[in-house]
Amino acid sequence: MKKALLWISLSNHRVKCNLCPHSCSLKEGQLGLCMVRKNIKGELISLNYDKIAAIHLDPIEKKPLYHFLPASQSLSIATMGCNFKCKFCQNHSLSMVGDQNQIFGEKKSPRELIDLALKSGSHSISYTYTEPTIFFELMLETAKLAKQEGLKNVMVTNGYMSQEALSMIAPYLDAANIDLKAFTDAFYQKYCHAHLDPVLDTIKRMRELGIWIEVTTLLIPGLNDDQTEVGQLIRFLHDLDVNIPWHVSRFFPHYQLLDTSPTNVSDITAFLKSARSRGLKYLYGGNFMSKKWANTHCSECGALLIERNGYSTLIQNLSAGNCTGCGNSIPGIWE
């Protein structure tokens, strides 16, 4: 256990957590919605600090990040807990904590994580699998050490963090893939126990702060695939920056949505084509095999820059972030 960051004391030994937009007000002994931060004797305590529940060496493309150090490896870590309650969660065995006795993990310090990353030959550390905001203390300490050692830092996030939290981690954060799960607040309330606007604010603020961002949307039949809604999502990304890569992933039945059918690939490709016609330049499909929607092409001359087959990545006509065919500068972090 570790004393948490980003909270204030209230009267009668209550505390208010300022880590994310839920802003949980907790009486003594009470857990936050994330189930990993607790009011203990009038102080907010992180219960998952240094309890590593998952640690793997992943290709960076798995995050997915397609315009960030392609073909590199990233040491990927997570603790238990989440500030969302998604009914379609693919990592619910880690994210959904019933009580504090269910918080497990291998004890590892930030220094030990950095040493593992360096030994593995990783170019970055990814805070992923569950929502990294809820292991903020561990992430921040590790990210600071990573910077000192020449490693980059990546968040794979639902974007549900306070602006204060984002301001604290931003100087050490190089890239993020943000899940934009839908484009209606009703969806976020019903299926995630959250709200849409704070996620949009995080996307906009990360871009303003110079963090490389890519956005992923899991397309769920009948729930977030309305043409008007998806059109509004595309317009939001377009108005923000046409160069933001958008990944549209195929849904498969999971967790509490076992009766929902998998996404038709044709629906995903139709939305990707629509996004392209509306001006988005870098579009990708996920959770299905497709050469067309896996590779990166130059937005000017159409040259094949990066070929992907699963998590096998071949860089072809890209040098120092420029297309070798026409010289076009490709947005991203390449070295």
Image: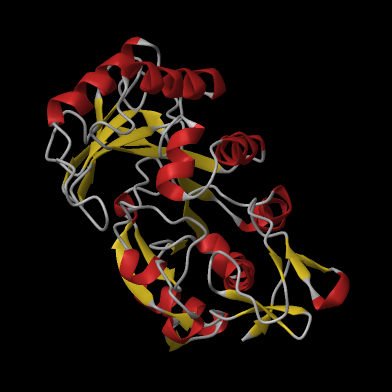
Number of numbered tags placed on the structure image: 0
Q: Residue at x 56, y 37 (%)?
A: 203
Q: Residue at x 33, y 36 (%)?
A: 247
Q: Give the x, y percent position of residue 12.
A: 85, 76
* 224 relative position to 147: left or right: left
Residue located 25% across and 31% down the image: 222
Q: Position of residue 170 (x, y in %)?
A: 65, 52
Outermost residue, top direction? 277
Quick one: 84 or 68, which is closer to the camera? 84
Nearest the camera: 327 or 313?
A: 313
Q: How is the image coloured?
A: secondary structure
For residue 236, above or below residue 65 = above
Image x and y of residue 195, in percent: 55, 41
Quarter-of-image position of residue 143: bottom right
* Residue 179 in view: no
In the rendered image, which quarter contains the N terminus? bottom right
Q: Is residue 270 left or right of residue 248?
A: left
Residue 238 visible, this angle: yes
Which residue is nearer to you in this view: 163 or 253?
Answer: 253
Where in the figure is residue 173, as x and y percent of width and height?
59, 54
Q: Is residue 76 above or below residue 110?
A: above
- In the rendered view, tell whether residue 165 sits above or below residue 293: below
> Which residue is found at the position 11% from the left and 40% from the top?
289
